[in-house]
Image (spheres, rainbow, N blue to C red):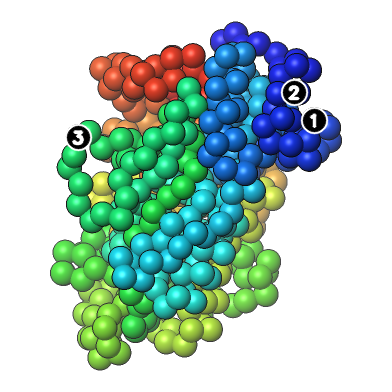
Amino acid sequence: MKYKKINNEVIGELKKIVGGDNIILDKEKMVEYSHDEFSLNWVQHFPEVVVKPKDKKEISQIMKLANKERFPVTPRGAGTGLVAGCVPVYGGAVLSLARMNKVWEIDKRNLMATVEPGVTLMDFYEKVESSGLFFPPHPGDETAFIGGAIATNAGGARAVKYGVMRDFVKGLEIVLPNGEILELGGKLMKNCTGYSLLHLMIGSEGTLGIITKAVILLMPPLKSVITLIVPYDSLHDAIKTAPEIILAGIRPITIEFIQSDVIPPAEKMLGKKWPSKKGKAFLMIIVDGPTEDEVSKLSEKIAEVCMGNNAKDILVAESKKKQADILAIRSNLYESLKPNLIETLDLTIPLSEIVNHIDKVNEISEEYGVWLPSYGHAGDGNVHTHIMKLRKEKGKFKVLEEEEWKEKYPIIRELLHEDCIKRGGVISGEHCIGVIKKEYVPMALSNAHLGMLRKIKRAFDPNNILNPGKMFDL
């Protein structure tokens, strides 16, 4: 891919658009814009300039300039992604959305919020809750920007009952690669007027347009919530319980499976304690309802299903503090494993195949002598297997030599993706593709499917200047 270098004349034009104080040219200051949170530094590319626009008009002017001068533009939120989706692989300009951080409106009559893309999830939750409403999606890292969560169609632990970002985004304002501004949807619950460009934008990883405003559906607050921790001697038994709970007519907010040996690092990091030391695996189940009685009855039904699948116990966390401690440990499993992590996968598999896939994970782990701890969303099939720089021997961990893990990593990675696809799964459920997973897209999608995606990209971005090099090659 050939692009023009950004010269001093273009820098001058960018300064006119956003102001000199909102331009970064110092390489040291651009380090944080050269990568995301992917655990290895293999995908690191520096931009030639970082620009920080304040509104859609400035973004429109930047994109018109980029088209005229043929330099690439990479939109960037908080940089919390795990697939190098916001890394400027061809240099050019990184367009930071950090200054666009306003919550314009919480409309209680329509149960809608209007926000800019640079609002952090943490701030958004606080604003929504202080208004007496609730926003269900909880992707995990609350420092992430809401624009990035939309661009990756983020999910999280509450997706079993309430869905993912796509279920809550009702309107978007978009700047297209040519600088045109497009309004999609609005404060509407139904809309079948033409093709849904709104849904096409959600999960497009900033390759088709730049989100400048979003209309988000909200809900009344949860009335009564209980968290159940269910220990098992077998991860196999824990995972196969999840679809049985749903088949019993119960739809919890969350059904997570967690191997017991991934919990101690998070406990140590946070100074918090998991409620049980029993068993080799756990289900974390969160149930809500209109009354305490209703939640209690649902919990009893869930307990029956769990005990019928060899659960060792049922532990109930009713207080908000206990629930928050449990959720904090679950949310920080990735961070606690990160020091010895190569990659965390994001495979999504039909519910009936999760158990079989985990059996394959264990088989690969044993064959190659690499610890592959897994946890994830048992209620929606999203499995996060972690490829570690560790071997587990007699309950203790040994760090692998760099030469060994570098040799085994690509083999293990390919075997896990192959098994997922063979079982009818997809290579990403919520982290998206970016650069890291791009090599597996031809394995996951047919030639006809890929061909249509390329035509869509060219229709929106004929000069391929917006976040090029992501998802698939043109």
User: Dividing the picture into quarters, in which one does residue 452 lie?
Assistant: top left
* Residue 94 in view (yes/no): yes
Check disc 1 and report its element: helix, strand or loop.
loop
- The mark nearer the N terminus, 3 or 2, is 2
- Against 38, residue 167 (above or below) is below
Spatial CA distance of label 2 from label 1 is 9 Å
Q: Where is mark 1, residue-wise?
A: 25
The image quadrant where one finds the N terminus is top right
x and y percentages locating residue 362 in the rendered image: 43, 47
Label 1 Cα neighbours within 10 Å, binned few <14 / some 14-19 / many ≥20: few
Quarter of the figure with the C terminus: top left
The residue under label 2 is 11
Tag 2: amino acid: Ile
Q: Name the residue under label 3.
A: 194
Q: Please name whichever residue, 16 or 24, is drawn nearer the observer in this view of the structure.
A: 16
Callout 3 secondary element = loop
Badge 2 vs badge 1, beta-carbon distance below 8 Å:
yes
Q: Which of 267 and 220 is in front in this view?
A: 220
Give the side of residue 368 with respect to residue 159, left or right: right
Circle 1/circle 3 CB separation < 8 Å = no
Going from N to C along the chain, the mark reached first, 2 or 1, is 2
Out of 106 and 439, give the one closest to the viewer: 106
Label 2 environment density (alpha carbons within 10 Å; few <14, some 14–19, many ≥20): some
**Above-or-below relation of 32 to 130:** above
Q: Which residue is drawn at 45% across and 63% down?
A: 105
Which image quadrant for residue 289? bottom left
Residue at point 39% right, 35% down?
182
